[in-house]
C-alpha cells in the first residue's frame, strides 16, 4: 500500500546546522495488518507518520500510496485523501468538550442524517460503551472511554488506513491493551499504523519497524 523511496525530512533548512528528522531510507508497508513503528523520542517515527498521512511533505524522496505519488498532490487532494481513506488517533483524544459521545463521532462523518448517527452508536457500542456513556460529554468519561470515542471517530468513515500516534501513552496498562485489541481487530481488514515507544503493546503486531536517529534500524515480521 505504501512504498517509501529514499525519504528525507530536514528541518531548519535555512540554518547552518540542519536537523535531519528522516535521514533517507526505503520502506514498504502492506495493504492490511497491524504495523508498529517504534523508537525513542526524536527517532523520527512521528515525522514518518506525518509524511505517510500527507500532514507533512518530505524534503526529498517519494511516497507512493497504492501506486500514486503523495508528494506531488495539491493540498485539496491531500485533504480529500485524509477525509476519505485515512483515520487518526492521537495520545490526546481531542474530543469536543461540549458534545456527547455520539456527536463527537458524527462530527467526523462525511455524510449526514439518521444513518450516520446509527453508525456512530453501533461503533461506540462495539467498542464497549454503554447507553449511558453515549450521552455523556468527555469530562464525564474515563480516560479509556474517551480514547474509545476517539477511535470510533477515526473509524467513522471506514478508513483504509488508521494512523495511531502514541494511542495508549496516557492510559493504564489494562486499558492500553484493551485499546490495542480494538486496533488489532480493525487491522484484520485494514492497515493500522501505531507509533509508540512501548514494546509491550506491540506483541501481536504483524510488522515491526524500529527507528533510530531518523533511520530504519530494523524491520521484523510478527511483532516483538
Image: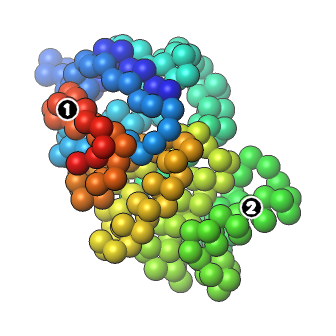
114 horizontally vs 4: left or right = right
* Camera-side residue of 164 and 207: 207
| Image spot of residue 216 (x, y percent) | 22, 29
Residue at the image point whose x is 74% and y is 46% from the top: 110
Q: Is residue 52 above or below residue 37?
A: above
Residue 56 in view here? no
Few, some or many residues within 10 Å of mark 2 (<14, 14–19, 20+): some
| Image spot of residue 22 (x, y percent) | 26, 26
Residue 169 in view here? yes
Residue at the image point whose x is 64% and y is 72% from the top: 125
97 horizontally vs 216: left or right = right
Residue at the image point whose x is 70% and y is 67% from the top: 122
Few, some or many residues within 10 Å of mark 1 (<14, 14–19, 20+): few
- Give the mark nearer the N terminus: 2 vs 1: 2
| Image spot of residue 79 (x, y percent) | 61, 33
Task: Judge depth for marks 2 and 1 and give the one in front.
Answer: 1
The image quarter containing residue 27 is top left
Q: Is residue 138 above or below residue 14?
A: below
Read off the residue under disc 1: 218
Residue at the image point whose x is 50% and y is 71% from the top: 146
Helix, strand or loop at mark 2 = helix
The image quarter containing residue 98 is bottom right
Read off the residue under disc 2: 119
Amino acid at each position: 500500500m505504501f512504498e517509501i523511496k529514499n525519504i528525507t525530512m530536514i528541518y531548519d533548512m535555512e540554518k547552518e546546522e540542519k536537523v535531519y528528522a528522516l535521514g533517507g531510507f526505503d520502506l514498504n508497508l502492506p495493504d492490511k495488518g497491524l504495523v508498529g513503528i517504534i523508537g525513542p523520542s526524536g527517532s523520527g517515527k512521528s515525522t514518518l507518520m506525518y509524511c505517510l498521512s500527507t500532514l507533512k511533505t518530505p524534503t526529498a524522496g517519494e511516497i507512493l500510496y497504492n501506486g500514486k505519488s503523495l508528494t506531488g498532490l495539491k493540498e485539496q487532494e491531500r485533504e480529500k485523501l485524509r477525509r476519505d481513506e485515512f483515520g487518526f488517533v492521537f495520545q490526546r483524544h481531542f474530543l469536543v468538550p461540549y458534545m456527547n459521545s455520539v456527536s463527537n463521532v458524527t462530527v467526523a462523518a462525511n455524510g449526514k442524517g439518521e444513518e450516520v448517527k446509527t453508525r456512530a452508536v453501533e461503533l461506540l457500542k462495539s467498542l464497549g460503551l454503554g447507553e449511558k456513556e453515549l450521552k455523556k460529554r468527555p469530562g464525564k468519561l474515563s480516560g479509556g472511554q474517551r480514547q474509545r470515542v476517539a477511535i470510533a471517530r477515526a473509524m467513522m468513515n471506514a478508513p483504509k488506513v488508521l494512523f495511531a500516534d502514541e494511542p495508549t501513552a496516557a492510559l493504564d496498562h489494562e486499558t492500553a491493551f484493551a485499546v490495542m485489541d480494538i486496533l488489532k481487530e480493525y487491522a484484520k481488514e485494514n492497515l493500522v499504523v501505531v507509533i509508540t515507544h512501548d514494546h509491550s503493546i506491540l506483541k501481536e503486531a504483524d510488522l515491526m519497524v524500529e527507528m533510530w536517529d531518523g533511520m530504519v534500524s530494523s524491520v521484523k515480521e510478527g511483532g516483538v
